[in-house]
C-alpha cells in the first residue's frame, strides 16, 4: 500500500507538471518538510505534491516518516486546501484524511496499529524566490497519537 501511494505521487509529479507560483487550476508544487508533534515530541520528515484542481482549491497528498524513541511510525495524508489570500504570503485552511501505521517495537515483535482519521489545520505558503517557497502548517491529526503539530519545509513549483 505504501509503495503504491509513493508511485501515485511520483506519477502525479510527472503527469501534471507546470511552472507557476499562483493558485490557478492545473498548477502544482512539490513539498519537502519536517514535522514536530507537540504532545509526544516526535520529529518526522516527509514529502507531498500539491495540485490545484480549481482556482484557490488544492489537493495535497503527503507521506511522512515519524521517528519515535521506540518503534516505527509513518503517516499518509490527503488534504483539501482552500487559499484565502494571494500574493507573496498565501494563507490557507485545510481538512482531510489521515492514515497512520505504528509498530511499537523496531524488531517487529510489538503491537502494530493501522488507524484512520481526519486532519484539520491552517497554514501558509510564503514566496521566497521564483523557484522556491516556504511552507508552514499547524495541524491536528485524529488518528493515534492524536496530537497537534507543526510542518515546516520548502515548496518548489512544478
Image (tube, rainbow, N blue to C red):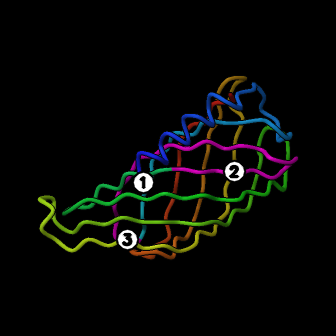
Q: Quadrant of residue 120?
A: bottom right
Q: Secondary structure at mark 2?
A: strand
Judging depth in this view, the residue of 29 and 5 nearest the camera is 5
Distance between mark 3 and mark 2 Cα atoms? 30 Å
Please say whether residue 24 is one of the residues in the magenta stretch. no
Question: Residue tagged by mark 2?
Answer: 124
Q: Quadrant of residue 157?
A: top right
Residue 86 picture location, percent across and down:
85, 45
Q: Residues within 10 Å of mark 2 (few under 14, many from 20)?
A: many
Q: Tell me which numbered mark, 2 or 1, is placed earlier along the sequence.
A: 1
The residue beneath circle 1 is 1
Question: Dot 3 corresponds to which residue?
Answer: 114
When the figure is inspected, residue 35 is found, relative to residue 94, above or below; the finding is above
Taking the spot 45% from the left edge, 54% from the top edge, the residue there is: 35
Give the image location of residue 4, x and y in percent.
46, 46
Magenta span has 60?
yes
> How far, Cα to Cα, is label 1 from label 3?
12 Å
Q: Residue at x 49, y 64 (%)?
A: 149
Q: Which mark is residue 133?
A: none
Q: What's the distance in space between the residues labelled 2 and 1, CA to CA? A: 30 Å
Which circle, 3 or 2, is nearer the viewer?
3
- Front-lying residue, 148 or 54: 54
Say whether disc 3 or disc 2 marks the residue closer to the N-terminus.
Answer: 3
Magenta part of the chain = 39-62
Amino acid at each position: 500500500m505504501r509503495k503504491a501511494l509513493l508511485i501515485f505521487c511520483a506519477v502525479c509529479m510527472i503527469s501534471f507538471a507546470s511552472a507557476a507560483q499562483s493558485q490557478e487550476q492545473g498548477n502544482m508544487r512539490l513539498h519537502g518538510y519536517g514535522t514536530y508533534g507537540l504532545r509526544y515530541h516526535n520529529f518526522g520528515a516527509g514529502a507531498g505534491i500539491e495540485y490545484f484542481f480549481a482556482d484557490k482549491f488544492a489537493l495535497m497528498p503527503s507521506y511522512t516518516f515519524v521517528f519515535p524513541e521506540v518503534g516505527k511510525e509513518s503517516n499518509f495524508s490527503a488534504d483539501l486546501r482552500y487559499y484565502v489570500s494571494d500574493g507573496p504570503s498565501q494563507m490557507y485552511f485545510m481538512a482531510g484524511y489521515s492514515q497512520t501505521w505504528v509498530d511499537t517495537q523496531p524488531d517487529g515483535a510489538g503491537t502494530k496499529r493501522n488507524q484512520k482519521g481526519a486532519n484539520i489545520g491552517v497554514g501558509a505558503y510564503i514566496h521566497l524566490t521564483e523557484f522556491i517557497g516556504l511552507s508552514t502548517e499547524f495541524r491536528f491529526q485524529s488518528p493515534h497519537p492524536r496530537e497537534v503539530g507543526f510542518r515546516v519545509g520548502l515548496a518548489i513549483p512544478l
